[in-house]
Structure formats: structure tokens, C-alpha cells
Amino acid sequence: MAAFDFTRYDALGLAGLIRSKEISAEELLDATIARIEALNPKLNAVVHAHFDLARKAIADGLPDGAFTGVPFLIKNTGFEVDGMILSTGSELHRNTVSRRDGTLAARYKAGGLVILGKSNTPEFALSFTTESDAFGPVHNPWDLTRTAGGSSGGSTAAVAAGLVAFANSSDGAGSTRLPASHCGLFGFKPTRMRNPLGPVAVEAIAGMSTPHAVSWSVRDNAALLDVSAGSDVGDPYAAPAEEGTYLASLARPPKCLRIGMTLTAPTGTAIDPQVLAAVRDTARKLEGLGHHVEDVADAGYDGHALMKAWRIIAGVSAATGISFSQQPGGPDPIEQIEPVNQEWVREGRSRSGIDYMWAINQLHATARALGRFFARYDILLSPVADTPAPKLGELAGRGRHLDEFFARFWSHGPFTAAFNASGCPAMSVPLAMSDDGLPIGIHFGAAFGRDALLFSLAAQLEQAFPWFDRRPPAPFGHAA
């Protein structure tokens, strides 16, 4: 095992090695733990290691699934795994331990995954950088002075650095896709409620938060959705059914697609010229693959209204969550959270029912607009973020009031939240690099329920412009 470099395989490849008995699940877990122990001190990507539970899962016997024996990380926000800490990036919940599996974790385990810990997140997932006061910053393996993104920054840095082949993430305004863009990974946000949030939670931030994963390969991402997708008992609504499996969709290259490309941020903020050039270059690549790309001014929704609505809904949701932490006669839990989030929670507490319903209707208005857009086009092409990965501290809330923090938060990911508001699927594909060697993801969105179309396009792009071996510098790339 000393010479075995598991980073040269994707998760399905590793599962195949275990299935053919070329390696054992125990050996792969040992190699994974050794890499985490060696590299995580530089990254701070894994905050709650539960290696004992992973070893026990293997010793007890793993089910036969698509990913039997493959190590996996769960994002430390919103996902319960029996016996594991769920601190949500906050001092308030530092010692909270889950006493059951959520539906998603149960499905991951049924697929044979070996869950070995929780990845770092910003407090309550309310940031596009992972720099919580309680657990510290996640460092981008491409440049340790830069952010890995947020809120799925820990999962994304861990995969980019080869600690695991893929990892769980979630996306409420771009929190899978922005970190994927900054770390050179494939990040996929499925259609709303394609993946379950139960058995207790009904929806997160008014249905905008959608869990899934970041990965090196498209096929891992598709196969994982085959494992996890499907409505849960008592769900208030469900995603439209699709024929066949997502993995099978990769073998069906899309025919000539009608693609609308927008390079203008919906709120009018500036986009880095290198990012714009990367999207234009992608348009040329798409045309070379036989697709038709057309410039469009925008997707037809009100970006300023959506920005305001998202802030209202996120603030009310955070305030609601905090209220459940209040102990009878005890101190207000708001005193244990970060100052910028204290301000956001207080603002959320002050909102009226009328404010909240106005915000919900803005989500629906965004969905209507995208529905009209996708009646004319198959795909919306745009940047993911306004820049490549910023320096640590530039997106953080520390030392900033809410207005300043939120303005920078939104300007960094101005294209992504419309797909959370509408529930439509979207993805970040690692097709470009900046002049100074930082990844630049390209954003693709499709109509509600058309996840398979996006996977088909991603597989076509991956085959034409492969990225699997484009890794961060040593020591985070492949072993020598």
C-alpha cells in the first residue's frame, strides 16, 4: 500500500478496485486517514474527524452498493450522521452530536460509502468563504493564501487536495458551485428536492438549499445522485421524474443545444476580465462541439429584487434556527454567534410576515422568468463568480457590518442564486485557469427537472477538455 496513490482514481474507480479485491476497504481507509493527517493541518478542511466510526462501519460489514468501501465527507451544516458532531461552523453548537442518520446520510451508507468525518463550513453556511471564528479558515490547495469558497469550502478543498475522491456539499445561493469554481472541481446543484432533506427538515431557506456533491469526475457526481435522489416520506413536493439513470445519461451526448450566454451581472456589478474571457472561450468550445450560442442581455429576472429577497429569507431562517437553541431561563444564544450574523439574526427577527411573503413571491417571480427563458433556450451560460478565488479575508464577515458584508457576498456570486430561487439545476464545470494559475469554473443552468441534460453536456465537455489530472501544486496533487 505504500506505493498506492488513490488520488489517481475517482470514487467509482476506487469502488471497482475494492470489488475486484485489488485493495480492501480497510486499506483504502488507512491510506485516506494518512493523507488527511498529513495534509489537513495545512488546509483545515476537515473539522470533525470520526475515523473510529468509519472503521466500525467497515468492521460491521458494508452493504453492496455503487461506492462500497469508498471514504466520504459530509458537510458540517444541516446533515445528521449518527454519532457525529454537527456544529454548523458555530461555537453555539460546538458539542452537538447527532443521534440518528438523516435520510441523505442513510442513503449514502446504503450506497456503501464510508463516512469518516465532517468538513469545515462558515457559521450557519451564511458566507461564500469558509472562515468561521469557531473553526478557522479553509485554505485553497491551489494557493493557501486564498479562500476555497463557501459555504461548502471544507468539502471542496478536501476533494481538490485529494483527501477524498468526492464529498457532500449543499447549495443555497451558489455554495456548491462557487467553491467548485475556486478549486477546479465539478460542482452540481440538482433540481430542488431532487435530494431529500428529511426525515425532520422539510426545506431549507424556503426551498433554496439543495444538497449534493463536488467531485473530480462527472461520473462520480452522476452516480452519487443515482444513489441519493428520490422523494422522502412526507415531502411537501418532489422533483420531476427522469427516465433512466444519471450515470447512463453521460453516454448520450446532447444534440445541438440552444445556449444563451450572459456576461452581465444581474445587479450590474463588475466581472473580472479573465472570467469574461473564460466564458467567451467556453462559448467557442461549445460551438466547436456543434451547439449554438447566442448573446443575451440577461435571463429576464430582477436581480436587485432577488438579492433583497434572499437576504430577508436567510435572515428569518437563521433567526428561526437560533430560536430553537434557546434554553428556558438561559441566555440568548445570539450572544454566542459571530457579530455579522448577530446583526443578520436581529434583522431577521424584525421582519414581518408581509416582508417574508414578499420575498417568497420574488423567488416565484424568478422561477417564472427562468421558465420563460428556458422555453427559448436549453442552457444558460455565464460566469460562476466575479473573480477567481479571492484572498482570505476579502469575503469574510469579521470586522464588517451586515450591509457591507452582504453586498460583497452577493457581488461575488451574482449569477448563481437565481437557480436556488427557481429550483432549476445548475453546475460549475472546471474549464479554465487564470493567468496566475487559479481555476475558473464556468456556469451552466437548465430548466427545472433537466438534471440529465446538464450531466450529458458535462460529460461531453469532460471528454473534449479533460481536467482530472489538472491538480493543485505539491503536496496536494498526485503523489510522485
Image (cartoon, rainbow, N blue to C red):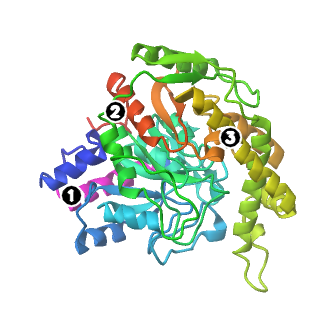
Q: Which residue has dot 1 on it?
A: 27
Residue 293 painted magenta: no
In this rendering, the label closer to the viewer, 1 or 2 = 2
Can you say whether 329 is above or below 393 in the image? Answer: below
Magenta highlight: main SS? helix
Q: Is residue 17 left or right of residue 371?
A: left
> Residue 42: x, y in percent?
47, 46
Task: Give the residue type at disc 1.
Answer: Glu
Whether residue 32 appears in magenta in the rendering, the answer is yes
Counting residues from the start of the chain, the first of labels 3 and 2 encountered is 3
Classed neighbour count for the residue bearing mark 3: other residues with Cα under 10 Å, few (<14), some (14–19), many (≥20): some
Q: Quadrant of residue 8?
A: top left
Q: Which residue is mark 3?
A: 368
Q: Amino acid at mark 3?
A: Arg
The residue singled out by tag 2 in the image is 468
Range drawn in magenta: 24-41
Q: Position of residue 477 (x, y in %)?
A: 35, 36
Disc 3/disc 1 C-alpha distance (Å): 51 Å
